[in-house]
Image: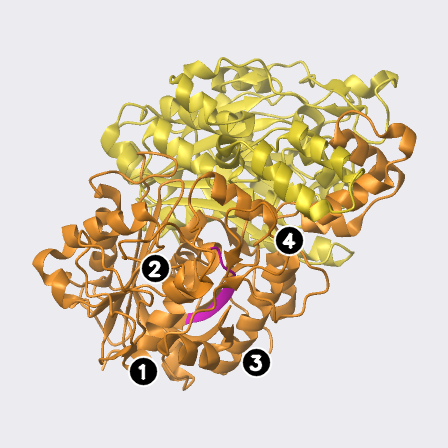
Chain colours: A orange, B yellow
């Protein structure tokens, strides 16, 4: 097969991005986020959402400026998705029902403790013994609780989005840990390449910072404990990095065939040129020591995009700031790019916005496309103490102006999840 | 739309339900002229009825004790069923096939530590600094391994670790809709030539009080108490949850035939949708799905209906299916197996494929009578209606 005006090197429809929206701890919307990100600002702060007594990590990139009807993960995740989807759809110049499929990366949610406490209080005094869940069930048998129920259904967020934006068919909710956002994008690309849809709405969202989620990651020794200087705690590729910083955020991308975008006169923000996923069977939380699956994922994404190792101008790294990830990521990148890696700038948005978990792949795809659009590469901040074992051009501390036409964005998650995306500029 | 080579065929079935383990057991149940008598347990407190997990020796599919210890029963059941499916497809020892096999899992969440949660609730009643207490107790009481057992995508992660399935790995969520989307996605990828083989399915454990909250917080469960006489086998009055672990190996016809694989059935089409549950919206939507998935309705000779058991939608489904597929014998999945949330749709497809491969009449599901007799199945439609949202349908056909 040869590439045509609207088809790629494998004869598949070219997938364009025509709308984007984003919210992070840095602010609401593309404009505010991009100016903060390129200015090297951090959105990480001490947690005020809940008491931090007795916690080993007391910082996060929570979003505290979006109104929600109830302070629970489902409502926050929905709000970030909704707001960014509005922004993206407006930018794409679409109105009315979206009429394409919806793919949402959303966090696995469970009822909040505040809700559990409230149900616990409704248990009559003489029945407060034994298993708490049996007590809850007795309460619900007397009186159902719609709010509690909605807070524990995994389909709630996508159901509301489907209604609000008039998407088509059964929405797909995806959870592949820290790769979820990238997986959702890949599903959206797949659907277009299958010829099943002319456009898809792809969203990554995560509003799940809570005491329990923080403690769970703490127990796995995954989080930074550098609480004294929140803005300096996330330091990917630095020698004194000690874990990631949990954060919240959301991003939406409108994907459509290049043909559809051009025929309706939409502005093309970039091309989703290549995607690849590859699972790792080594360990539940650690990657294969040889970097094999991550290398295969990066190579697969390049091949899917029809590019060689010399075809990537910039790498938007996963760069979580955990000792393990950053080392493995360097191993994988050097395994793929070899000596050329020294010439490719690599930066981590997580140095500023923290690790937005389920949303990260989508948010970082938006920022990757912004780099293509603007010719500005965001820095890796807090890079004052380089790890000599990771000799990368991290765009240390200050943004760089450099026109680029291609970006690799990587996502690696617990459970052996690896997903990579290649984005390119609109074909000339 | 599919080219012949990219037709999607089912070459492996891993199935565990309250009625037993494996294809032989379930094919036998479907071929037996006697009705399938459900296995229900009534010892969930407060009294609930469920279709329970059968006795399983996990070691048969999860040989390493260390791996078993990293999971609770939800993940164990999924990993076990996935192993059965790979064995059944003859791919378990085929490292090359597993290394580029797609994996699509429909997942809920893993088990919570009920003892810890109970301690916290008890403590909360004594304290007015509840949030600080929560920090204290979670920090000291939560077990790190349990977090991994709770993580939704770690069912897929454990399948990769135990069975070395390491192509793409996608975990979909959203109750019944996740099971529908898993099959829809797998089918679409193979039909479009994006993939040649895929392991897809789900696990659901019914006898979990933390899961019961999902049904009971809306009062959707069967309200009768365990003392009532016909509860063990009678027709459910509300949602009765059923444990199920079901994984399927889907392959392109070309790949399956090249390796001489046994083909249970052709997965012709899969579709899903969602929307308001009032009438006529629900019936109109089912009608649209059926028009896409099974346009030749008169050729369908078996329908396995998967409504959850909530009375109104279950009746709507029954009425729609009877009129839409007039020549089909209708079987109600919940009468024999209960409702398996994420696993409901994969189970329906497994049962449909086994029924087609049996080439015998399909036994009645449950003991209520009234199910029409069937002939051998050439073409089957299976449905799932989520207990709250989401509808899916698939059509299967005899191979050749």
Q: Of residues A47 and A6, which is closer to you in this image?
A: A47
Residue corresponding to mark 1: A374
Name the main secondary structure of what is drawn in magenta.
strand
- Number of other residues with Cα within 10 Å of mark 3, as a class: few under 14, some 14 to 19, many 20 or more: few
How far, Cα to Cα, is label 4 from label 1? Answer: 41 Å
Residue corresponding to mark 4: A51
Which comes before the other along the chain, label 4 or label 2? 4
Q: Chain of mark 4?
A: A
In terms of secondary structure, where does tag 4 sit? loop
Q: Chain of mark 1?
A: A
A239 versus B204 height, above or below:
below
Q: Quadrant of the C terminus of chain A?
A: bottom left
Q: Quadrant of residue B52?
A: top right
Q: Which mark is residue A235?
A: 2
Residue A253 part of the magenta segment? yes
Judged left or right of residue A201, residue B288 is: right
- Number of other residues with Cα within 10 Å of mark 4, as a class: few under 14, some 14 to 19, many 20 or more: some
Q: Of residues A229 and B114, which is closer to you in this image?
A: A229
How far, Cα to Cα, is label 4 from label 3? Answer: 43 Å
Q: Quadrant of residue B223?
A: top right
Residue corresponding to mark 3: A95
Which comes before the other along the chain, label 2 or label 3? 3
In this rendering, does residue A98 appear at all? Answer: no
Q: Are marks 4 and 2 in contact (CB under 8 Å)?
A: no
Judged left or right of residue B89, residue B47 is: right
- Number of other residues with Cα within 10 Å of mark 1, as a class: few under 14, some 14 to 19, many 20 or more: few
């Amino acid at each position: 097969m040869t590439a045509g005006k609207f088809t790629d090197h494998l004869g598949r429809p070219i997938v364009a991005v025509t709308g984007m929206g984003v919210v992070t701890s840095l602010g609401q919307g593309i404009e505010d986020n991009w100016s903060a990100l390129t200015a090297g600002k951090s959105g990480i702060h001490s947690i005020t959402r809940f008491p931090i007594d007795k916690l080993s990590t007391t910082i996060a990139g929570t979003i505290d400026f979006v109104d929600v009807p109830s302070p629970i993960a489902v409502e926050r995740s929905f709000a970030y998705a909704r707001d960014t989807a509005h922004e993206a759809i407006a930018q794409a110049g679409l109105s009315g029902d979206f009429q394409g499929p919806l793919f949402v990366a959303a966090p696995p949610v469970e009822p909040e403790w505040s809700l559990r406490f409230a149900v616990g209080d409704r248990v009559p005094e003489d029945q407060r013994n034994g298993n708490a869940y049996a007590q809850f069930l007795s309460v619900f048998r007397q009186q159902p609780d719609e709010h509690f129920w909605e807070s524990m259904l995994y389909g709630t967020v996508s159901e509301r989005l489907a209604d609000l934006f008039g998407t088509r068919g059964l929405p797909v909710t995806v959870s592949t840990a820290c790769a979820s956002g990238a997986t959702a994008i890949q599903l959206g690309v797949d659907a277009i390449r299958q010829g099943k849809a002319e456009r898809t709405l792809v969203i990554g969202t995560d509003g799940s910072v809570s005491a329990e989620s923080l403690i769970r990651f703490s127990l796995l020794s995954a989080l930074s404990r550098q609480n004294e200087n929140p803005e300096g705690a996330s330091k990917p590729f630095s020698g004194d990095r000690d874990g990631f910083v949990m954060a919240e955020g959301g991003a939406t991308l409108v994907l459509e065939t290049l043909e559809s975008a051009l025929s309706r006169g939409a502005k093309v923000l970039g091309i989703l040129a290549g995607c690849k996923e590859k699972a790792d069977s080594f360990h539940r939380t650690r990657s294969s020591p040889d970097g094999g699956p991550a290398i295969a994922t990066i190579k697969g994404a390049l091949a899917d995009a029809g590019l060689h190792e010399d075809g990537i101008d910039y790498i938007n790294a996963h760069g979580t700031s955990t000792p393990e990830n950053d080392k493995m990521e360097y191993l994988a990148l050097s395994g793929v790019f070899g000596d050329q890696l020294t010439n490719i700038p690599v930066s981590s948005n997580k140095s500023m916005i923290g690790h937005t978990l389920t949303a990260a792949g989508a948010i970082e795809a938006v920022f990757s496309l912004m780099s293509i659009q603007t010719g500005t590469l965001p820095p890796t901040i807090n890079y004052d103490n380089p790890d000599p074992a990771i000799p990368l051009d991290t765009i240390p501390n200050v943004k760089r102006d450099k026109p680029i036409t291609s970006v690799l964005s990587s996502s690696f998650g617990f459970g052996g999840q690896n997903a990579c995306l290649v984005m390119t500029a609109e074909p000339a | 739309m599919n080219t012949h080579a990219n037709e999607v065929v089912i070459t492996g079935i891993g199935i565990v339900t309250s009625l037993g383990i494996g294809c032989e057991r379930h094919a036998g149940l479907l071929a037996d002229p006697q009705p399938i008598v459900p296995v229900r347990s009534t010892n969930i407190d407060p009294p609930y009825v469920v279709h329970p997990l059968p006795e399983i020796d996990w070691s048969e599919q999860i040989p390493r004790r260390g791996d078993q210890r990293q999971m609770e029963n939800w993940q164990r059941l999924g990993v076990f069923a996935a192993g059965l499916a790979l064995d059944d497809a003859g791919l378990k020892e085929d490292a090359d096939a597993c290394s580029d096999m797609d994996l699509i899992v429909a997942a809920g969440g893993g088990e919570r530590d009920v003892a810890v949660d109970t301690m916290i609730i008890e403590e909360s009643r004594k304290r007015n600094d509840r949030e600080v207490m929560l920090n204290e107790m979670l920090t000291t009481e939560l077990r790190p391994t349990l977090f991994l057992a709770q993580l939704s995508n770690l069912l897929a992660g454990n399948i990769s670790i135990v069975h070395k399935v390491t192509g793409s790995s996608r975990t979909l969520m959203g109750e019944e809709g996740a099971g529908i989307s898993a099959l829809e996605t797998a089918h679409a990828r193979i039909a479009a030539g994006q993939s040649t083989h895929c392991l897809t399915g789900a696990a659901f454990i019914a006898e979990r009080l933390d899961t019961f909250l999902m049904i009971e917080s809306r009062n959707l469960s069967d309200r009768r108490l365990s003392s009532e006489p016909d509860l063990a086998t009678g027709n459910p009055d509300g949602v009765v949850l059923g444990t199920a672990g079901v994984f399927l190996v889907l392959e392109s016809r070309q790949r399956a035939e090249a390796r001489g694989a046994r083909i249970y059935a052709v997965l012709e089409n899969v579709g899903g949708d969602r929307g308001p549950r009032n009438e006529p919206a629900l019936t109109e939507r089912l009608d649209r799905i059926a028009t896409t998935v099974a346009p030749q309705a008169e050729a369908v000779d078996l329908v396995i209906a998967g409504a959850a058991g909530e009375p109104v939608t279950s009746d709507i489904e029954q009425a729609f299916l009877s009129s839409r597929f007039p020549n089909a014998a209708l079987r109600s999945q919940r009468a024999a197996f209960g409702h398996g949330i994420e696993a409901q749709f994969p189970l329906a497809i497994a049962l449909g494929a086994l029924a087609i491969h049996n080439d015998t009449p399909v036994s009645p599901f449950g003991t209520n009578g009234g199910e029409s007799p069937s002939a051998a199945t050439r073409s089957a439609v299976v449905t799932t209606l989520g207990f709250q949202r989401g509808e899916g349908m698939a059509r299967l056909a005899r191979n050749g």
